[in-house]
Image (spheres, rainbow, N blue to C red):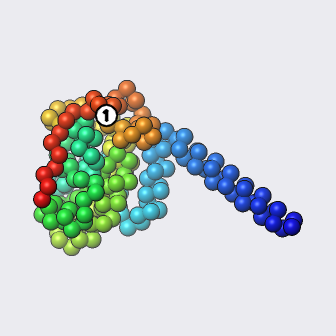
Amino acid sequence: MAVRHRMAIAAALLVLLAAAVTAIFFLARGDDGLAKVHAGLERQFPRVEHITGADLEALSPGDIVLFDTRESAEYATSHIDGAVRVDPAIAPQRFLAEYGELARGRIAIFYCSVGARSTALADKVRMRLVAEGAKQVFNLEKGLFGWHNQRRALVDANGRPTDAIHPYNAFWGRLIDRQDKVVAEEEAPAIEPLPEV
């Protein structure tokens, strides 16, 4: 009986330890939290390469194609100039059929709010994109929240410079440093949905 009791205590301690680690992760804000999210994405998707905001800015716009894998309200609020919005739930075959030609001879860079949706899509299509002529495939490290936290340029749905950013939701929005720039869902500008093919 003593062995079972010790095992139960050990199991309870492991649960408490896991809860403490999870709490530390979820309480992290800004770039600390984004760094933790990024580390988790690197473990989950080890074949996807990542590019920093500084390295992205150093590339010539003609050498890259940016794929924004966020919802339309997020994109309408702000995005990196020149980015093409892609439905985050798009099937890999449909993505390749619709956007594969855009990536031919260029570096394809995916991003979303923190990198989860974009890394997942990049992982699904990267090999085929390269096989069809893309030079490389990257995910933007720390996503658009990291880009925004570093005070890099964004544009709104009309192509005008903006500091506004969509939080995705209240939980993930805590990773945005400048909370005064967060746009609530009801304040986000309208944008036309992607046409169905």
Residue 79 visible, this angle = no
The image shows residue 183 at horizontal and vertical percentages of 32, 31
Q: Left or right: 35 with respect to 147?
A: right
Residue 48 lies in quadrant: bottom left
> Residue at horizontal 49%, vertical 39%?
29
Q: Is residue 101 above or below residue 56?
A: below
Q: Quadrant of the C terminus?
A: bottom left
Q: Is residue 136 above or below residue 193?
A: below
Q: Is residue 179 above or below residue 107?
A: above
Q: Quadrant of the N terminus?
A: bottom right
Q: Is residue 24 above or below residue 162?
A: below
The image shows residue 74 at horizontal and vertical percentages of 28, 41
Q: Which residue is mark 1?
A: 185
The amino acid at mark 1 is Glu
> Residue at horizontal 25%, vertical 36%?
77
Count of labels shown? 1
Residue 154 lies in quadrant: top left
Relative to the observer, which residue lies in front, 16 or 59?
16
The image shows residue 186 at horizontal and vertical percentages of 29, 31
Q: Left or right: 4 with respect to 143?
A: right
Secondary structure, mark 1, is helix
Relative to the observer, which residue lies in front, 131 or 193?
193
> Residue at horizontal 35%, vertical 41%?
168
Mark 1 nearby-residue class (10 Å; few <14, some 14–19, many ≥20): some
Q: Residue furthest top?
A: 180
Residue 170 visible, this angle = yes
Q: Residue furthest right?
A: 2
> Residue at horizontal 67%, vertical 52%?
17
The image shows residue 43 at horizontal and vertical percentages of 47, 62
